[in-house]
Image: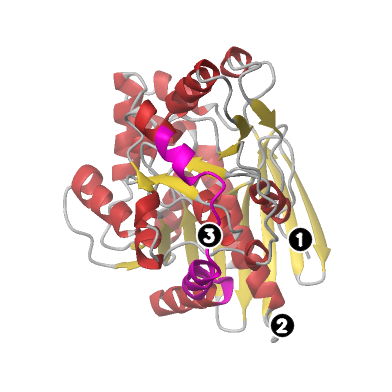
Amino acid sequence: MVFLRCLAGNSRLFFILARTKMKILTNIRDSKVCGISQTLNSFLGFIESRKKKNAKIIGVDVSNGQPGLARTQDGQFSLISSTLEIPQIGRAVLEAQNLGDLRRAYRDTIEQYKIAIKDEKPDIVLVNGTYYLPWCLYLATKEMGVATVLHYHGSISKETEHWQEKPRKLFKEMEKSFDSKDLSYIFPSELTKQVVENEVFGHAVKKYSILPNAVPLHFFEQKVNRCKKNIGIICRWAKVKNTDFFNKLAKYNQQQGNRYIINVVTDLKKNALPRQALDGLVKFRRPVCSAEMGKFYSKMGIVLSPSVFETYGNVPQEAIASGVPALVSSNMGVAEIFKQVGLAELITDFASLPNAYEKIKDISGQSVSQEIREKMKELLSPDIIHHQMLNILESKI
């Protein structure tokens, strides 16, 4: 059963997973290039594939539109589709004078989450991310008094560091409001924990677990058909992903006689100005589901992940699992996994474009040893990671 289809549009989903002893309510953003979607999709797939079918999944699709509600059911999976008018966040943060104003602007959205909590009576709520919809879910859990865990995917403070001062401060306050003695945290990396403690909350976090993201097994089964000339880039088109580096790389590569073919898988629309500016310099490719990404990785000589900051980073570990080398920034949580499996040399400083380009020339086309792939599989297989996730959640009830 496919729990989260690769849908177009701006729909937002949250799911309720019911087991014999535990019912979990959680939120997700539907996106083919969004790590939160991929992580939760993998978790739901693991639950469904377990031999003991003691789980019921209830999904609630909340999207922008005329108010309405629809319910469907298919075996273990039920879907509640809810539409309402959701304020555009960019406008909302400009109009709000403080976090209270922002909370009032999203009152109806918060109420939708409260209704789901009231109707489904979950044992625990798993909040994914720190953006405004996860924030609305968190506020709903506070009002309903249900046990809550924050899975720290993404930092809204880091994502909006380039915004104007007023909205940037509001987003920082939004993230800081997740600081609560009643909340437990799952950090995907030690890096994330340190950044949250030092730059957001301003103090040490007591109730937490460190749990990296799983790698779907189909990546380890991928047969490599790499082309040394192919550079792969997969990401949301956001400043925090270091899109400035992509622009400079494309132009520098042209100056070097187009030594490489730069392939970019992103959510950037065809008529977007950044995409038009790179016309002829890179090949833009449409996002595909996780099951299809292995084929893309296998054709690359190298994959690049130069993020300014990332709480984790699924792309580089998927590339390594597929047998293709990936260069990562030291400001990514996944760099910790690279060190554990013996790939510290692939952690790169992208500040100097010529140096990074030389590193690409040295690494592109090399193979990732089967030993490294097996080490990563032992650490990050879905069965291992998702069992740990269930144990963590059960311990919080």
Reply above or below: 197 against 361.
Answer: below
Q: How many numbered badges does the structure rendering display?
A: 3
The residue indicated by pointer 3 is: 368
Asked if the residue at tag 2 contacts the one at tag 1, i.e. Cβ–Cβ closer than 8 Å, the answer is no
Q: Nearer the viewer, mark 1 or mark 2?
A: 1
**Disc 1 and disc 3: Cα gap in Å?**
31 Å
Q: Which residues are magenta?
A: 358-383
| Mark 3 nearby-residue class (10 Å; few <14, some 14–19, many ≥20) | some
The percent position of residue 180, horizontal first and vertical second, equals: 28, 56
**Disc 3 and disc 2: Cα gap in Å?**
37 Å
**Rendered image quadrant of residue 55:** bottom right
Reply above or below: 322 against 330.
Answer: below
The residue indicated by pointer 2 is: 53
Q: Nearer the viewer, mark 1 or mark 3?
A: 3
Residue 296 part of the magenta segment: no
Decide if residue 188 is in sight here: no
**Disc 1 and disc 2: Cα gap in Å?**
16 Å
